[in-house]
């Protein structure tokens, strides 16, 4: 169960060929562990989230937008965002622009480019003790193979993670043969930066965890 709330303040100025607007928005999403933590199941009340703490995402953003239509064949749409992530304490500049050309009443060509970012899941950011799996599910490599492979035994959040970002460009074409038949073609390219990937590290390298020396030699903990 999630609780989504926020607000948006904006103002727009319209003219014959150009519409300009700007504003501010604050958005917040949280699970309802603290507000609606229980459900009724077969007559018994159960905690939905158990002992897990509430997790939330919040952003505060300024934006400006413009729509320009100098004639019947050409139009341009632009939106510029300055977004502040309250989870990762980072600021992102995300401009987006679309140019639309209509050479005939039945054809349209659109060129779009933009930048965007995506927040890490809150569970990956919230500092907490490591979450250990069941010991019976651990499959240790043979000590005679000498593979040196790491074995996953626990997971832990990293409050230093930053959002993923992407730069995109797209070219689209559409043609209408009649009121019931049309075709569309679309080509696009996306460059993703700071992608969040999972991986295994030796448990002894995590500073806040103390591993007894006699356990480090066991394959489950060793590199």
Image: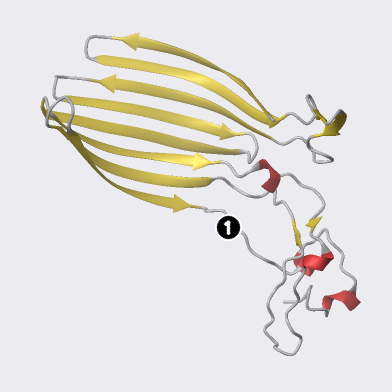
**Above or below 44: residue 207:** below
Q: How many marks?
A: 1
Q: Residue at x 80, y 55 (%)?
A: 130
Closer-to-camera residue (173/81): 173
Residue ID for mark 1: 197
Image coords of residue 25 (percent x, y): 54, 21
Closer-to-camera residue (10/122): 122
Q: Residue furthest bottom?
A: 144
**Above or below 13: residue 50:** below
Q: Residue at x 12, y 27 (%)?
A: 178
Packing grade of label 1 (10 A; few <14, some 14-19, many >=20) is few
Query: Left or right: 110 with respect to 219?
Result: left
Residue 167 picture quarter = top left
Q: Residue at x 45, y 39 (%)?
A: 116
Name the image quarter holding the N terminus: top right
Residue 185 picture quarter = top left
Closer-to-camera residue (213/108): 108
Q: Residue furthest front?
A: 42
Image coords of residue 74 (percent x, y): 17, 26
Image coords of residue 177 (percent x, y): 12, 31
**Above or below 112: residue 205:** below
Query: Left or right: 109 with respect to 192?
Result: left
Q: Residue at x 84, y 61 (%)?
A: 209
User: What sort of colour scheme is used for the picture?
Assistant: secondary structure
SS class, disc 1: loop
Image coords of residue 143 (percent x, y): 76, 86
Name the image quarter holding the C terminus: bottom right
């Amino acid at each position: 169960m999630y609780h989504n709330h926020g607000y948006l303040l904006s103002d727009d100025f319209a003219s014959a060929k150009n519409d300009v607007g700007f504003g501010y928005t604050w958005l917040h999403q949280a699970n309802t562990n603290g507000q609606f933590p229980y459900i009724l199941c077969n007559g018994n009340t159960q905690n939905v989230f158990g002992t897990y703490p509430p997790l939330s995402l919040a952003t505060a953003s300024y934006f400006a937008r413009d729509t320009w239509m100098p004639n019947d064949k050409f139009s341009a749409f632009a939106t510029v965002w300055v977004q502040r992530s309250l989870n990762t304490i980072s600021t992102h500049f995300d401009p987006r622009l679309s140019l639309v050309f209509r050479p005939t009443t039945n054809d349209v060509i659109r060129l779009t480019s933009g930048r965007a970012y995506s927040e890490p899941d809150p569970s990956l950011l919230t500092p907490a003790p490591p979450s250990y799996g069941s010991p019976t599910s651990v499959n240790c490599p043979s000590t005679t193979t000498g593979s040196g492979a790491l074995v996953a035994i626990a997971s832990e959040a990293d409050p230093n993670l930053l959002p993923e970002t992407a730069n995109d460009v797209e070219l689209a074409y559409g043609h209408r043969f009649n009121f019931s038949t049309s075709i569309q073609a679309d080509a696009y390219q996306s460059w993703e930066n700071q992608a969040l990937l999972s991986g295994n590290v030796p448990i002894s390298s995590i500073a806040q965890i103390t591993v007894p020396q006699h356990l480090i030699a066991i394959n489950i903990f060793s590199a």
